[in-house]
Amino acid sequence: MGASLGNNGFVSEINVTPFVDVMLVLLIIFMVTAPMMTEGLDVDLPKTEAVESLPADPDNVVLTVRKDGAVFLNEFNVGMENLATQLAVVVKAPSRRLFLQADKEVPYGVVVGVMGKVRAAGIEELGIVAERLDDEPPGGGGAQADQTVPARPDPARPGQNNP
């Protein structure tokens, strides 16, 4: 459609073509970048037989230990020296649940050190994230959470390991 001039010389129609063009470009950008933003951190999780689904509650916090020793709270890099303080602020104060996922090649001593920082922050329960042994876990794949274990031994439960 061409521009029509009214009696006073103003265009009385709105040209929506540039608006539609910009919106389509923004939609394409969103469609391309959205999957990259939700992937999380690259961790090769250990595999086990009995695991439960990781709760999809947005209040959960995931503590990740990568193969290179880097420690992340959700997707934010935190150092080991600041970990207990960050956990107290991010997890303990708002009463959120904490899940630990560590690469299967991380040395046991590093995982125990991280669990010690969790304990120092005053967090009583810690969930462990793992994958199922079978190739295709039910429900379409993804990370699985082992049962939440207390961060401290419970004297009422004999035989419980001390983290």
Image (spheres, rainbow, N blue to C red):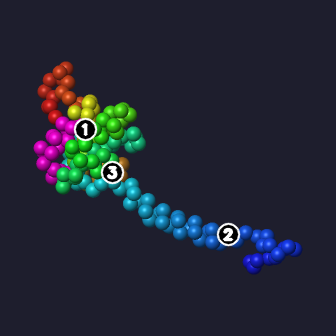
Q: Residue at x 43, y 62 (%)?
A: 33
**Which residue corresponds to mark 1?**
84
Return the residue nearer the eye: 149 or 121: 121
> Residue 122 in the image: x percent, y percent?
26, 31
Q: CA distance from mark 1 to mark 3?
A: 17 Å
Left or right, 89 with respect to 79, comes to right
> Residue 146 in the image: x percent, y percent?
26, 40
> Residue 16, labelled with which disc?
2
Return the residue found at the far top.
156
Is residue 1 depicted above or below 56 in this figure?
A: below
Is residue 145 depicted above or below 27 in this figure?
A: above
Q: How many marks?
A: 3
Let me know if residue 111 appears in the view: yes
Q: Are marks 2 and 3 in contact (CB under 8 Å)?
A: no
Q: CA distance from mark 2 to mark 1?
A: 54 Å
Q: Residue at x 78, y 73 (%)?
A: 11
Q: Residue at x 21, y 38 (%)?
A: 117
Decide whether the magenta segment is chiefly helix, strand or loop: helix
